[in-house]
Amino acid sequence: MTVDVERDCRAMAERARAASRVLGELPGRPKVDCLRRAAEGMRVGSDALLRANALDVAAAPSFGLTDAQVDRLRLDTSRIESMASAIEQVAGLSDPVGEVIESRVRPNGLRVSRVRVPLGVVFFIYESRPNVTADAAAICIQSGNAVILRGGKEAVHSNRAIVAVWREAARASHIPEDSVQLVPTADREAVGHFLRMPEWIDVAIPRGGEALIRRVAEEARMPVIKHFAGNCHVYVDASADFGQAVDIVVNSKCQRMGVCNACESLLVHEAVADAFLPAVAQALAKYAVELRGDGATRARVPEANEATDADYAAEYLGPVLSIRVVRDLDEAIDHINRFGTGHTDAIVTREIEAAERFARRVDSAAVVVNASTRFHDGGELGLGAEIGISTDKFHARGPCGLRELTTYKYVVLGNGQIRT
């Protein structure tokens, strides 16, 4: 960007608005063609992507990234293939634009329909995960939205290479290149400028640390789709199958620790704590997970450290797990609703009534019964890739896929009716 950052930001936003008007009117075929070309471009250009990513990984220590953050930043051939496959999955989903949500005929003969339409221009601010760049572009194009991407400085080379693939795919598919744009500066001032452009940008979506999300929510003059943190719980009920419960806890916590749907807190019914806690502690020890628990937990697992309220409220994104022994299901639910962040919470139980009460009373974007919290993900839930997981209640909740990036308009068809 030039010295006049505000002018350059406005120019990008204006180009995005112009692209969105073209993209929003396109039929499904050019959009699908663009996605398939982009997926193939990822595969064919994998060497270039890996070279660009190697520059970012090499620079990671200078940014003070943790091991978990470096892991999220790093690409390899398997992750590039996963990116390409995720794009193809989105291409295989039905185009939401133009879908008639409902239609009815009024007594006066007017046909009133609600029709799904794109939001328009998305400003997406996110952390150092290059695959998110590919996912966001796929979801936005397939849902008819132009997107302005502002990735973290830690992934600048990777993001440039990925966006170059997308823009080439757009050109080849006769879609405006500016349907996908990458903010070329890490200057925080640029973010502020974009957030003050509601006339050009329809929605802001921050994905990253809580400080970033709070800043966007406070400064944005357009709607924001957000989640502040992912303090996810697994509650092991008195009737739980022990083997199943251990597997679910370990997978929820350890399958990938630095992600928002990883388990951060374990609740165990006191009736099974004597047998279950030593077993799950032994399983977690293989992954070097530090345990922090209440007195009842430490009495059964002596190696656990003392937990505080701050621990129960924490999103660790690493090898730490808080544990509490509870009297019953109600106490577990109260704990979750107090300390949780409304993201993902799971119960392991063999009682249908307990599962139903848990699902009804836990106020989270996803409630999981007898399965890992790691399934709260757009791809795993059949939505294709996602642009984020929202803990809001308006306008979207849970994984934000194609339909979550649309709104609707009323289309009213008449035959000369006038209102009297």
Image (cartoon, grey):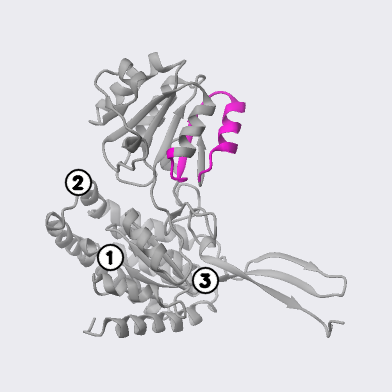
Residue type beneath disc 1: Val
| Quarter of the C terminus within the rendering | bottom right
| Quarter of the N terminus within the rendering | bottom left
The residue that label 3 is drawn on is: 119
> Relative to the observer, which residue lies in front, 88 or 333?
333
The residue that label 2 is drawn on is: 67
Q: Is residue 365 left or right of residue 205?
A: right
Alpha-carbon span between mark 3 and mark 2: 37 Å
The kind of secondary structure element at disc 1 is helix
Residue type beneath disc 2: Asp
The residue that label 1 is drawn on is: 44
Residue 8 on image: x %, y %: 30, 83
Residue 284 on image: x %, y %: 29, 27
Alpha-carbon span between mark 3 and mark 1: 32 Å
> Relative to the observer, which residue lies in front, 136 or 345?
345
Q: Is residue 345 left or right of residue 210?
A: right
Residues packed near mark 2 inside 10 Å, few (<14), some (14 to 19) or many (20 plus): few
Question: Magenta residues?
Answer: 339-364
